[in-house]
Image (cartoon, coloured by chain):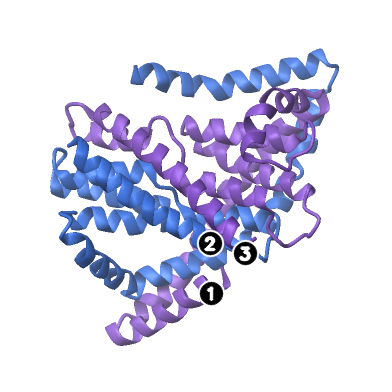
Chain colours: A blue, B purple
Amino acid sequence: MISTIEYLSLLIIPLFILFTVLYGTFKKVRVYDSFVAGAKEGPAIILKIFPYLLTIFVAIKGFQASGAFDYLRDAFYRVFAFLGVPIEAVSMAIVKPLSGSASTALFTDIVQTAGVDSMATYMSAVIMGSAETTFYVLAIYLGAVSIKKTRYLVPVCLIADFIGILVAVTVAKWFF
Amino acid sequence: MNVLWLIMICVSIVFAIFTGNLEAFTKSIFDGAKSAVEVSLYLLGIISVWMGITKILEDSGLIYRIAHLFKPLICRLFKNIPGDHPSITAITLNVLANLFGLGNAATPLGIQAMQDLDALNEDKGTITPEMMTFIVINTASIQLIPFSVIGILASYGHSNPAAVVLPVLIATAISTMTALLVLAAFRRIFR
């Protein structure tokens, strides 16, 4: 079942490109020229996104390096400890919204130190699979269209993230 | 974003001073800048590829056909998208890419969707309700199979790494739904 879906997801992009190119040719579009014309817009978009990405990355890296991150994690841990949530899962819950690569590294580390069959691993796995790198998504998507007034979007995302982690912890406890 | 960024920077610096991590903090700022450049270069490649593909979709008119096909589904969540607007196609493809865990495709398609939604924006620079819904769906993450998690578990010799699929699916489904409910609640308060 899983391998079927995995194969399907490997197939989906190549098939989509093939279909697009064939349909374009059928509709008498000069697909090569079209592709080039589209690709030309890429650099302009990146130039728009780059300053936003830089700004948020600097804040995130600084937050991690200053020790503020560890303090936040310990504070969260005290709250979650009585729910029986392992500290590894708490770290994962805070890292995942901040950085995708850091959360992958952390997850690998948790699997190594806590063991593949531990509660810490399961809980981190569910959090890692069900949460998203919120800050990265916000920086890129808002930067792409230069949105300055985000109204109540950021609090909504943060509250939703927090609820999402509670859900992930509960589901993981229920399953394992 | 302003408030959040200000808090993060100030808290970090105060902490760095008190914990004696000043050197690490300063170094991390340039690390952050470096990874922003790396991520941007990486994105430059994949975004340009998807812009190329999208241009063929546009020129052949396929983008409007896909929009027409998925309009009934997408417009349940996004109320103010007119006719067979291209943004419907971008949103549909982004959601599909997310579902199948195709990160390389999801981000460029999401950027495309934001640009298409911005074309409908009358007050540029201010976010629209449609954009908010779209971003909330993306930050809540909707994924059928967490391939990266399964891959790591398998590589460390887990006997049945696929055991995480169902809990992850249930967790994402519930958290995406609650995220949309939170958004709806805020929308009602700040009308």
- Give yes or no for contact between labels 2 and 1 (Cβ–Cβ under 8 Å): yes
Q: Quadrant of residue B37?
A: bottom right
Looking at the image, which residue sits at the far top?
A26
Residue under mark 2: which chain is it in? Answer: A
As measured in the structure, the alpha-carbon distance from the residue carrying label 3 to the one carrying label 1 is 12 Å
Q: Nearer the viewer, residue B74 or A138?
A: B74
Residue B148 coordinates in the image, percent (x, y): 36, 37
Residue B39 coordinates in the image, percent (x, y): 53, 53
Q: Are marks 3 and 1 on the same chain?
A: no
Q: In which quadrant will I find the C terminus of chain A?
A: top left
Q: Residues within 10 Å of mark 2 (few under 14, many from 20)?
A: some
- Up/down of A163 relative to A60, above or below: above
Q: Nearer the viewer, residue B37 or B150?
A: B150
Residue A94 coordinates in the image, percent (x, y): 34, 59
- Residue A154, numbered circle: 2
Which residue sits at x=16%, y=39%?
A116
Element class at badge 1 = helix
Q: Quadrant of residue A7?
A: top left
Which residue sits at x=70%, y=51%?
A45
Element class at badge 3 = loop
Q: Residues within 10 Å of mark 1 (few under 14, many from 20)?
A: few
Which amino acid type is shown beneath numbered disc 3?
Arg
Which amino acid type is shown beneath numbered disc 2?
Val
Which residue sits at x=39%, y=40%?
B174
Mark 3 or mark 1: which is in front?
Answer: 3
Residue at mark 1: B3
